[in-house]
Image (spheres, helix red, strand yellow):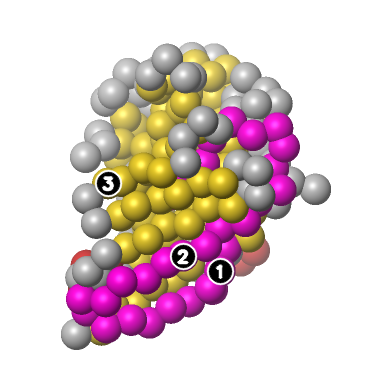
């Protein structure tokens, strides 16, 4: 089982509030990712990081920001939450496995965010 | 356009029966294809990963196949159990970047009834 953790698991918050979703992994993975997933829909990459002090935006435009000050920690912040931010947020990390260069992604349990 | 299409969208089977889930992709270039299992309210968990040269891989009761020529993959579940109820997601990675960009299908929602 993967050692990647997300908190909180569930969050209900009012519009305009600032929130931070926490993600940490104890596997020493360099690469970390944030995905957004709506029910019955595919995962969309919103942020990723190759390592400390490296962050990039993903495919899906997002008003959130991320930071990577420590290898094991990759928090996601929404400065002003809106109802359109209601979704499930999944954090993942990878290491390079085998000699074929295939990344195995390990996912956290997710944070279900509801903005009222 | 790089896409991953899965079918059926949902499937209900009785415990003990077998089933096969399909994945068609148009991702190019191709690096590898993975099947994930996602329980409700949880993150996806990797079941199998196959590269271009592999056409079948098993993980217990799960067997994945890959036809890189037709760009099709299937996931066969044998002797289904209630715990198999989950969403099964097909994910294809390209070779186009150092990130190995991932393309996700929408998943097949499998329900196993007793």
Look at the image and give the residue range highlighted in magenta.
B6-35
Parent chain of label 2: B
In the rendered image, residue B34, in percent from the top left (x then y), is placed at 46, 43
Residue at 27%, 46% (x, y): give it.
B59
Taking depth in this image into account, of A6 and A102 the one nearest to the observer is: A102
Res. A89 visible in picture: no
Identify the element where label 3 is drawn.
strand
What is the distance, in whole Å, between disc 2 and disc 3 at their CAs? 15 Å
Parent chain of label 1: B
Same chain for marks 2 and 1? yes
Q: Is residue B55 above or below residue A69?
A: below
What is the distance, in whole Å, between disc 3 and disc 1 at their CAs? 21 Å
Label 3 or label 1, whichever comes before in sequence order: 1
The residue singled out by tag 2 in the image is: B21
In the rendered image, residue A77, in percent from the top left (x then y), is placed at 53, 41
Taking depth in this image into account, of B18 and B15 the one nearest to the observer is: B18
The residue singled out by tag 1 in the image is: B7
Parent chain of label 3: B
Q: Is residue B96 left or right of residue B50?
A: right
The residue singled out by tag 3 in the image is: B59
Q: Is residue B89 above or below residue B86?
A: above
Identify the element where label 1 is drawn.
strand
Give the quarter of the image for residue A72: top left
Identify the element where label 2 is drawn.
strand
């Amino acid at each position: 089982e993967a050692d990647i953790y997300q908190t909180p698991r569930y969050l209900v918050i009012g519009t305009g509030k600032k929130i931070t979703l926490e993600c940490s992994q104890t596997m020493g993975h360099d690469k970390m990712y944030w995905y957004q997933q709506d029910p019955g829909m595919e995962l969309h990459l919103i942020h990723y990081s190759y390592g400390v002090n490296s962050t990039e935006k993903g495919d899906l435009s997002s008003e959130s920001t991320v930071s990577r000050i420590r290898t094991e920690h990759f928090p996601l912040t929404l400065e002003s939450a809106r109802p359109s931010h209601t979704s499930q947020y999944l954090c993942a990390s990878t290491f390079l496995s085998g000699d074929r260069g295939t990344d195995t992604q390990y996912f956290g349990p997710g944070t279900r965010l509801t903005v009222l | 356009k790089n896409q991953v299409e899965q079918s059926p969208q949902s499937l209900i089977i009785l415990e003990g029966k077998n089933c096969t889930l399909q994945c068609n992709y148009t991702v190019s270039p191709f690096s590898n294809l993975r099947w994930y299992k996602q329980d409700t309210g949880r993150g996806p968990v990797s079941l199998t990963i196959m590269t271009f040269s592999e056409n079948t891989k098993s993980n217990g009761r799960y067997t994945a196949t890959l036809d890189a020529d037709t760009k099709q993959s299937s996931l066969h579940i044998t002797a289904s159990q209630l715990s198999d109820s989950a969403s099964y997601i097909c994910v294809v990675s390209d070779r186009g970047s150092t990130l190995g960009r991932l393309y996700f299908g929408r998943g097949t929602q499998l329900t196993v009834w007793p």
